[in-house]
Image (cartoon, rainbow, N blue to C red):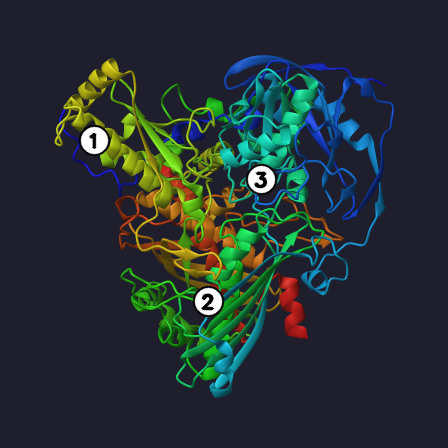
């Protein structure tokens, strides 16, 4: 039996898209290869590292674990949709100021995780921040500067 | 516009490429696309050692569409050139470790390619393999050279054998450390274009462009100008992208040459973890003579590391580990005997610290045992033996800098509230049966730059070029891998030239365009390369001054104007600077005596832990990292280096366990190889003391590797203080602790 490509209509970074893809194609590949949104990265391919995080209808998900068939009609935000033109989001600016990004490979996912956390909980405690970011691995920073960045961003 | 008087060095200026990193605009190798690009895959040995009998291409696949490369396709020398050229680029008749590359495939469809990779059957007649350092030393099989030994060192100061008879105490101990995966979040990857006309060009995730360049020259037998290596943005390295990228670049280039297409070869996580290098496992034996006052009389140290199947960097990892084995202590009689041995594990390689975390773990655990034997507190034993100005290290290096380890220790113990906590924890532990609290520390040093004569041999060169607008471009092969190369080198150049930080940029590391400033390793980028950037920048200014276009005191406008005129007249304004060893630095490679490093960073780290005696888990509750690193160029970046290194070392101590099964890593996934998450780490509190180093840029020394050295022994010392049980191996997993405590 041959599996046919299907058409999926969804919104990515406020733009409507009609995507042709195999139903079980990973959202990660469809966005990176099909739409050339390469800000999200494949760090592990099994939902552990969070480098491929995107917001799916406002929820933080690992795009490596999402079959594209599931995003029909969905609203997707990637890191490329966070800054308003040249104007960085407060979390992005805060990551810059506090040294929250080092090699940068986890940064897009980490920024989205922080934004998602602050949307759910505008005044997180440090424990909340630690839990909120626990699905996103960073090997460079030891997370301390990321915590500082999130704390400052939520004060804005 | 007036002369820029603001100090730039010492400021927490924002990361040069930070904006592209927080917006996702940064392009890493897997983000690059080339027209008509194919994908590559590597078929590897399923077993650790054997003779290749046949290679079969099975299944119902259109094999004629694939580019297939084996050792026979190599036009130059079949090796991944490094120190020795013993590691093949593709195994030919024999395999010597599991996951050794044997066949390469390329195809435009990466999904079909993966099916094909699984359909290649390599038939191998197994040969007996070695998996332990003891088996290697006992020569149960000979798998490398005459004796399974890659390298041996002997460091000798005084004569330890004269001391044993007169010592009040002789204290012995054995200490072991495991393999550790670098676990950069971006897996390894390369893209190559290659053909007879243009030669070979690769783009990749890498630390050392000229290492890759050297390896490709040998593999293809091409002249230097026919090989070009370009660094793409690199998502973490930690040593893991020091030598192995040469192998991947070779593979991608072989495929591209044969396919006549650009080939992208990206490892997935499982392949990266199973096949690429890890930190060398080690075993250290200490025999120490000490008198009743706690004075170290003799230190006899045997240090062995498992190098895996090929020599790769083991000799230099061993060298650094050997030199750091006696720590920051003054002892008249020291003997360090060390060996790097061959096993049939995948080659172990560079990883932040480079041998020092292993030997320092052993020493800092052992000194607590020595202190207990003598009846002194661990801090007191160290105070009685610290190195001071004018005294010598194990290699006879005279300490010429102002050094106050006593003061550093006192401050670290104060910052961590060590003494008060020690008392409180004793009370707590007396009444709490399941939650035991402890606090411990380690004192240590880390040499910056290549060991011994290394920097003299490297002869690094740095360039700097001004444009007609007065902006300045730094030309180095030193790579940004997250540690802040772009930012700190820009700060150093801006400071030297009194220009705005924004006027400085770095050329992309590209062997066709930048000189060889050496590899991005060994905590050398700031101290060694940074100093060369400073000299080259001053050379640039000097050129303008000598041309009469600039006076010593100038405004930004005068600078811009001078550059414009000079370039209009001469075409280009460039300055180069080449490494020269500081005076009074001498090293004897024969005796392994002398000035092992130009400068050391010095540190005291304190860990506070809770050990849960129900689950046997250890949690680090607080961590103080105090270090003297010369001048701090950028406080936020420097603290970020320390925090990240401490986090990695907490993983090394407590979580990160490579499970070996006949030479194959079985837990090659992030699901079951556990690195610290944001919920696992204590507050990491970082403090610096500054004692400017004469030959570093603005007085800076190296810091990148230092934080990897101290946490593991500090944590295990804290665990001992919590539960009164001595454990001397890492990683210390709950199951290990349970076994020890129930034994």
Badge 2 and badge 3 both on one subunit? no
Name the secondary structure under disc 2.
loop
Tag 1 and tag 3 share a subunit: no
Q: Which residue is mark 1?
A: B542
The answer to which of B452 and A7 lies nearer the viewer is B452
- Report in which chain the residue with disc 1 lies: B
Q: Quadrant of residue B5?
A: top left
Q: Quadrant of the N terminus of chain B?
A: top left
**Chain containing mark 2:** B
Q: Earlier in the sequence, mark 2 or mark 1?
A: 2
Secondary structure under the numbered disc 3 in the rendered image: loop
Q: Of the numbered discs in the image, which one, if any, rests on residue B326?
A: 2
Task: Please state the horizontal and vertical placement of residue B177, each as a whole percent of the image.
Answer: 59, 60
Q: CA distance from mark 2 to mark 3?
A: 38 Å
Q: What's the CA distance linking mark 2 and mark 1? A: 44 Å
Which is nearer the eye, A148 or B336? B336
- Which residue carries the number 3 mark? A49
Q: Position of residue B512 (x, y in %)?
A: 46, 24
């Amino acid at each position: 039996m041959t599996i046919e490509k299907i058409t999926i209509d969804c919104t990515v970074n406020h733009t409507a898209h009609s995507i042709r893809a195999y139903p079980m194609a990973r959202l990660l590949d469809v966005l990176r290869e099909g739409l050339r949104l390469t800000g999200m990265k494949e760090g592990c391919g099994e939902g552990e590292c969070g480098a491929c995080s995107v917001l799916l209808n406002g929820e933080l998900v690992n795009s490596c674990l999402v079959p594209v068939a599931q995003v029909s009609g969905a609203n997707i935000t990637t890191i490329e949709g966070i800054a308003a033109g040249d104007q960085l989001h407060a979390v992005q600016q805060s990551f810059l100021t506090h040294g929250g990004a080092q090699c940068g490979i986890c940064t897009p996912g980490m920024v989205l995780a922080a934004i998602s956390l602050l949307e759910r909980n505008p005044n997180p405690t440090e424990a909340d921040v630690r839990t909120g970011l626990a699905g996103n691995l960073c090997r460079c920073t030891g997370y301390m500067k990321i915590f500082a960045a999130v704390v400052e961003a939520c004060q804005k | 516009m007036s002369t820029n008087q603001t100090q730039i060095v010492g400021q927490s200026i924002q990361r040069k490429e930070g904006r592209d990193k927080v917006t996702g605009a940064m392009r890493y190798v897997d983000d690059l696309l080339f027209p008509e690009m194919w994908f590559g895959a590597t078929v590897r040995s399923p077993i650790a050692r054997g003779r290749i009998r046949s290679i079969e291409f099975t299944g119902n696949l259109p094999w004629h569409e694939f580019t297939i490369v084996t050792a026979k396709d190599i036009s130059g020398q079949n090796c991944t050139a490094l120190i020795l050229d013993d590691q093949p680029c593709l195994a030919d008749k024999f395999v010597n470790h599991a996951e050794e590359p044997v066949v390469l495939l390329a195809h435009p469809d990466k999904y079909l390619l993966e099916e094909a990779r699984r359909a290649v059957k390599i038939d191998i007649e197994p040969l007996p393999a070695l998996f332990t350092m003891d088996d290697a030393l006992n020569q149960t099989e000979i798998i490398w050279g005459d004796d399974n030994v890659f390298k041996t060192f002997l460091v000798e100061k005084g004569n330890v054998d004269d001391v044993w008879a007169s010592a009040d105490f002789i204290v012995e101990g054995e200490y072991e450390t495991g393999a550790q995966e670098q676990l950069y979040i971006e897996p390894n990857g390369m893209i190559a274009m290659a053909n007879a006309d243009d030669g070979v060009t690769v783009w990749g995730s890498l630390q050392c462009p000229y290492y890759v360049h050297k390896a490709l020259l040998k593999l293809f037998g091409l002249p230097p100008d026919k090989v070009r290596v370009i660094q793409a943005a690199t998502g973490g390295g930690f040593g893991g992208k020091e030598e192995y990228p040469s192998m991947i670049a070779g593979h991608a280039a072989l495929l591209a040459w044969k396919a006549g297409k650009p080939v992208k070869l990206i490892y997935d996580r499982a392949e990266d973890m199973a096949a690429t290098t890890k930190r060398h496992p080690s075993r250290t034996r200490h025999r120490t003579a000490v008198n009743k006052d706690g004075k170290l009389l003799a230190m006899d140290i045997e240090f062995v590391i498992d190098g895996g199947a090929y020599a790769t960097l083991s000799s230099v990892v061993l060298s650094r580990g050997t030199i750091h084995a006696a720590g920051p202590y003054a002892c008249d009689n020291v003997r360090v005997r060390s060996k790097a041995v061959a096993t049939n594990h995948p080659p172990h390689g560079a990883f932040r610290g480079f041998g020092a975390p292993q030997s320092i773990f052993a020493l800092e655990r052992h000194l607590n045992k020595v202190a207990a034997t003598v009846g002194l507190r661990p801090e007191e034993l160290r105070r009685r033996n610290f190195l001071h100005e004018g005294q010598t290290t194990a290699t006879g290096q005279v300490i010429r800098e102002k050094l106050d380890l006593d003061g550093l220790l006192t401050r670290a113990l104060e910052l961590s509230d060590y003494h008060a906590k020690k008392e409180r924890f004793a009370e707590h532990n007396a009444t709490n049966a399941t939650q035991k609290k402890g606090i411990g520390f380690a004192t240590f040093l880390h040499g910056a730059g290549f060991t011994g004569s290394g920097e003299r041999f490297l002869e690094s060169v740095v360039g700097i070029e001004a444009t007609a607008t007065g902006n300045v471009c730094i030309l180095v092969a030193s790579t940004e891998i997250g540690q802040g190369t772009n930012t700190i080198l820009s700060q150093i150049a801006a400071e030297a030239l009194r220009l705005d930080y924004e006027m400085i940029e770095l050329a992309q590391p590209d062997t066709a365009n930048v000189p060889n400033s050496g590899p991005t390793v060994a905590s050398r980028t700031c101290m060694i390369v940074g100093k060369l950037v400073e000299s080259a920048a001053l050379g640039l200014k000097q050129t303008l001054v000598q041309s009469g276009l600039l006076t010593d005191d100038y405004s930004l406008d005068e600078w811009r104007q001078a550059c414009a005129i000079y370039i209009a007249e001469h075409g280009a304004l460039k300055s180069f600077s080449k490494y020269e060893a500081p005076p009074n630095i001498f090293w004897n490679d024969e005796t392994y005596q002398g000035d092992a490093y130009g400068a050391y960073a010095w540190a005291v780290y304190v860990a506070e832990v809770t050990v849960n005696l129900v689950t046997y888990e250890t949690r680090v509750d607080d961590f103080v990292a105090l270090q003297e690193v010369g001048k701090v160029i950028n406080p936020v970046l420097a603290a970020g280096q320390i925090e990240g290194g401490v986090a990695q070392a907490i993983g090394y101590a407590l979580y990160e366990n490579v499970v070996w099964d006949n030479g194959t890593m079985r837990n090659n996934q992030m699901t079951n190889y556990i690195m610290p998450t944001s919920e696992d780490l204590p507050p990491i509190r970082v403090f610096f003391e500054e004692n400017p180093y004469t030959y570093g840029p603005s007085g800076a020394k190296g810091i990148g590797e230092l934080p990897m050295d101290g946490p593991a022994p500090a944590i295990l010392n804290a665990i001992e203080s919590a539960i009164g049980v001595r454990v001397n191996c890492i990683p210390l997993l709950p199951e290990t602790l349970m076994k020890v405590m129930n034994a």
